[in-house]
Amino acid sequence: IRTLFTVCAALLSFSLLQGQAVEITPTYGYQFGAKYNYGSNYLKIGDSGMFGIAVGYEVRSDYMIEVSYINMSTDLRIRDRIASPTESRLSDMNVDWFMLGGTRYFGNDQVKPFFGGQLGVSIFSPKNVDTEIAPRGLDSVTSFSFGFKGGVVVMLSEKVGINLQGNLLFPVQWGGLYVGAGTGGISTGINAGSTIVMGGFSGGLVFRLGT
């Protein structure tokens, strides 16, 4: 997070020196979870509220480069025929997204639909793990991620507006659960898996600085 703030501060300083516009957009919304199937079993990240912030630098009219951060705090649930035959809470789960992307705006100066793409990393951090299911705990997982967003900005004045948007986030190789039963008992952990999709929607204020 400290690195993100450093990049945002650098973008802001550079834009003001160059006379270019910067938009700062704090948001709050709802992020849908995801389900990862392995055989007849599954892991499930629950839906939850989310908050985020994006800082965009206007490289030319209607085009912005953006640095963004999104956080959701949810839970991780499991159904596994060996470890948990019925769906149970496995752990709390904190998910952080650090993304860099570009956004194309349309429309006029007051109502501006937009579409954008992003690349970055997502960090899945389990905590308060149910040690009866996973006696060795679960490690955090960092994965390459990409995403898309679309929505509209309605400017209330030259400097302040409202942002409404939806997003699709794709953590690649996020992971699945492996369960092994042996003489030492059940061992559980997060292992490499396939891409999952997490969507959501949010709203926030837009603060435009510079020209």
Image: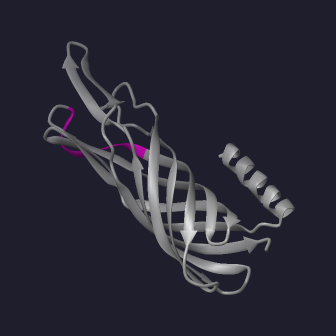
For the point 37% across and 56% down, the residue is: 198
Q: Name the spot of residue 13 as percent of width and height, x first.
A: 82, 57
Task: Residue 128: name its quadrant.
Answer: top left
Residue 17 lies within the magenta run = no
The answer to whether 45 appears left or right of 111 in the picture is left
The answer to whether 19 appears left or right of 104 in the picture is right
The answer to whether 154 appears left or right of 168 in the picture is right
- 42 lies above or below 19: above
Task: Residue 80: name its quadrant.
Answer: top left
Q: Which of 43 and 103 is in front in this view?
A: 103
- 87 lies above or below 163: above
For the point 81% across and 56% down, the residue is: 14
Residue 85 lies within the magenta run = yes
Residue furthest to the front in view is 60
- 5 lies above or below 115: above
Q: Nearer the viewer, residue 170 or 57?
A: 57
Q: Name the spot of residue 76 as percent of width and height, x first.
A: 35, 46
Chief secondary structure of the magenta portion: strand
Q: Which quadrant: the C terminus?
A: bottom right
Q: What stretch is highlighted in magenta?
A: 83-92
Q: Name the spot of residue 58 as percent of width and height, x first.
A: 69, 65
